[in-house]
Amino acid sequence: MNQKTATIAYILGIIGLFYMDRSDKERTSKALWIPVMWLMIVGSRPISLWFETGPIVAQGDAGTDGSPIDAAVYGILAIIGVIVLGSRWPRVKSVLRGNLPILLYFAFCALSIIWSDYSFVALKRCIKAVTDFAMIAIVLTDPNPGLAIKRFFARVGFILLPLSLLFIKYYPDIGRVYDPWTWEPLYCGVTTFKNLLGMICLVCALGAVWSFIGAYERPKMPRRTQHLAAHGITVAVAIWLFFTADSMTSLTCFLMGGAVMVMTTQRWVVKRESVVHALVACCVLMSLFALFGDSGGTLVGSLGRNPTLTGRTAIWQAVLSMHTNPLIGTGFESFWLGSRMERVWKITDQHIQEAHDGYLEVYLNLGLVGIALLATMIVSGYRNVLAVYRRDTHAGRIRLAFFTAGVIYSVTEAGFRMMSPIWIGFLLAITRVSSNSLEKKSRRRPELAPAADVPEARTEVAVQEFI
C-alpha cells in the first residue's frame, strides 16, 4: 500500500471510529473540544514542530525560549477555557472549594517563581500547569460529565493512535527518529519521543478499556456492538504501539490500571472496599519491589530492562549531586535550565531534561515542601477517588485506574509535570466533586438533553457559539 492510499484508508478508519462511537440521544457541551485539543497537543508535539516553524536554540538553552505560534495557540485555548469556566461559575466554585490540597500545591508552584533563576520561564510554565487543571475542570463541569470523560479520552485516542500507526509505517520521516549514538530507529508516531508515545497510549488505552467495560455492562445499549468495536480497536492499536515503541513503563502501568478496572467489575470486589484498597496497594508495592527490592533484577529483567533501569540510577545520583535547596528547591520547573542541566549532561553523558522519577523531579524543583504538598494531594486524592467509587462504581473505575497508573508511572518517569498526559489523567482522577455531583446526576439521568436545553447550561450558549 502506497502512502496516498494508506493515508486515505487511515482517515476513513478514524472517521469510522467516530461514527461507531456516536450517540443520538446523549450530548456533551461543544466546549469539550477545548480540553480535547489541549490533550492532543500535549500528547503529540507542539504546533510549531508540525509546521517546522520552531526556533533553533543552542544546546543548553533548550526550553528557555518558545515559539510565538505555540504561545499563541496555548494562550487562545487558555483564554477560551477561562471564558467557559466563567460561564459555569457555580459549578466551578464547587470544584475549587472541594480541592484545597490541589490548590495549595499550585499556589506553592506559583510562589516558587520568586526564587527561580529563570523567573519568566517559570511563570510561563506555571500558567500552563494551571491551564492543565482548568481543562480538567471543563471536563468535570460538563452538563454530562460521565459522557464527557469518555469522549475526552476517546476523541484523542481515535485521532492520535491511528495517526501514530500511519506515521510509523508509511511516514518514517515523521514517525521515527534515530538514536544519535547507535543510529537505531526509535518509533515516536505523532510525538517527539517514544516515552511520550507510550504515555499517550497509556492514557487513551485506559480510557478505551473503561468505555469498553461500560458498553459491555449495558446489554440494551443502542449500537452496543459498534461501541465495543471502536474501543476494542483503540486498545489493540495502543498495545501494538506499546511494543513497537518499546515503552515498557507505560505498558506496565496500563496492565496495572486495566487490571484494577477489570477486577472492580466483579461483584465480590464491589461489595468489599477493603479489596479495592488491597488491589491498589498490591499494584504499587509490586512495582516498588520490582524496582528497589529485587536485588537480582529478575522482574525488571523480564521486561527487557537492565537492573539499573537503563541508566536511571546513574541519573538519580547525578541530579542529587547538584545539592539544590532541600527545603524549597530551585523553583517551579527550573532545575533543567542553565548550568545545572549542562553539569548533569557532563556527568551522565546524556542530553536529558528530566530526572526519570516524578517524586525526585518535584523535590528538585519544589524541595521537601513540594513533596509534602504532593503527598497531601495524593492522600486526599485517593479519598476523593473512593468517594466517587462509592457513589458510582463505573465512574470510580477510571479514577482508580488513573490514580494507580499515575503513582506507579512516576517512580521511573517524570509523571508529575505540567502538560503531561499522565499528569492530566492523574489530576482528573483525584479532583473532588461535590456530594450532589454532576457525575451522580449523569448516572441517574443517562440521556440528557443537549447542553443548550439544560437550564443551568443556558449561559454557555454564547460561549459555545463563539467556539
Image (cartoon, rainbow, N blue to C red):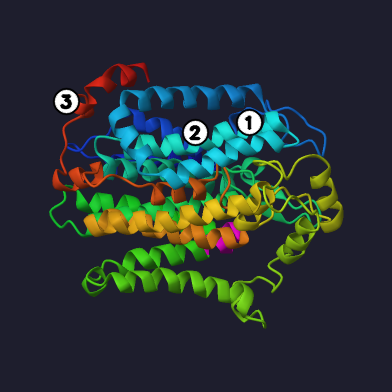
Per the image, label 2 sits on a secondary structure element best described as helix
User: Which portion, as a residue range, is magenta?
Assistant: 244-251
Q: Is 248 contained in the magenta span? A: yes
Q: Is 293 contained in the magenta span? A: no
Tell me the tag on residue 131: 2
Name, please, the residue furthest toward the bottom.
Answer: 296
> Disc 1 marks which residue?
123
* Pointers 3 and 1 in contact (C-beta within 8 Å): no
Which residue sits at x=37%, y=34%?
A: 138
Per the image, label 3 sits on a secondary structure element best described as helix
Query: In the image, which is nearer the foreground, mark 1 or mark 2?
Result: 1
Compared to residue 313, the image places residue 105 above or below, namely: above
Circle 1: residue type: Leu
First-in-chain label (1 vs 2): 1
Circle 3: residue type: Asp
Per the image, label 1 sits on a secondary structure element best described as helix
Which quadrant of the figure has residue 95? top left
Which quadrant of the figure has residue 175? top right
> Disc 3 marks which residue?
453
